[in-house]
Image (cartoon, rainbow, N blue to C red):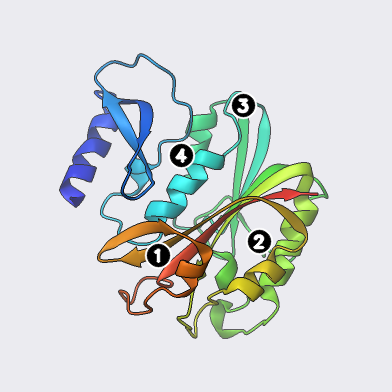
Amino acid sequence: MSEIIKTIAELQQKKIIHVVRYRKNERTGLDIPVYSLSAAGKHVRLDVHSLLTGVTSERLVEYDFLARNLMSSRRSVAILDVGSAGSALAQAMREFGSSRWQVLGIDLVQGCDAMMDSRSAGFRDGAFDQVISISTIEHIGFDRGVSDKSGDAKAMKEIFRMLKKGGTAIITVPYGKRKKLKHRVYDRETLAKLVDRFSVSRKEFYRYDAGKWVKCSQADAGRADPQVPLHFHSAACACLLLKKK
């Protein structure tokens, strides 16, 4: 499967094939790209499949959720990617948004636009139309052996501050039973507390089942079997679209 994905990515980069629309997989509920040799039709959202070559982790569903909830590429907006080091996502968004999107990525390590702590970021109030954070919030406060138990809450407070009124945040975090020493895993209570400043516009839950990520209810995500590959953050994940009240 990874070879097929790699080939598709190469064909896209060479502009031999193009995504013309999406269809929903009835079994998993995920959106599947439909390719064409012709460039006819417009891309309605960011195509993240070229970023997922060989990936089996939560990114498969997290990036799909992200692509469906990004702001319109026809609008001039400022977007902040929190935890962008080592990821090609910010650059992919720049290319998708063309000259209309201003995309900045921050992290505590090199490999991003600015080295910055998301708990005390150096941007003015209301600087961004949208903030995204893919599998990052759960790590904040566990950096370099320093434990800050409220690091995730501080980061969410900063995200709220940096968003314009009516702006949105796309947040994904591990969910379920499995507990790890290097990051948090959220349950119904801790997730609700994490996002209590925002109104929740959309939320989706996925669990890892028989080698696949499957969309499920929040209750089923909470009961997901914790026995998953060690590189997974958890057996389930929560994907949230939040709005600043």
Q: For the point 67% across and 81% down, which residue is it?
A: 148
Amino acid type of the residue tagged 2 in the rendering:
Met
Distance in Å between CA atoms under marks 4 and 3: 14 Å
Q: Quadrant of residue 138?
A: bottom right
Residue 152: x and y in percent read 66, 71
Q: For the point 48% across and 27% down, which residue is it?
A: 44
Instruction: Determine whether label 3 and label 1 are within 8 Å by CB.
Output: no
Give the number of marks: 4
Residue 7: x and y in percent read 19, 39
Q: Which callout, 3 or 1, points at the residue further toward the start of the chain?
A: 3
Residue at the disc numbered 4:
92
Comparing marks 3 and 1, which lies closer to the viewer? 1
Residue at the disc numbered 3:
100
- Residue 196 versus residue 232: which sits nearer the camera? 196
Distance in Å between CA atoms under marks 3 and 1: 35 Å
Distance in Å between CA atoms under marks 3 and 2: 24 Å
Mark carried by residue 207? 1
Q: For the point 25% across and 66% down, which residue is it?
A: 210
Is residue 33 rendered to the left or right of residue 5?
right
Mark carried by residue 116? 2
Mark carried by residue 148? none
Amino acid type of the residue tagged 3 in the rendering:
Arg
Which class describes the residues within 10 Å of circle 2: few (<14), some (14-19), or many (20+)? Answer: some
Which element carries disc 3, helix, strand or loop?
A: loop
Instruction: Determine whether label 3 and label 2 are within 8 Å by CB.
Output: no
Residue 81: x and y in percent read 59, 50
Is residue 147 rendered to the left or right of residue 206?
right
* As drawn, 50 above or below 19: below
Distance in Å between CA atoms under marks 2 and 4: 21 Å
Which element carries disc 4, helix, strand or loop?
A: helix
**Residue 53: in sight, yes or no?**
yes
Q: Quadrant of residue 74?
A: top right
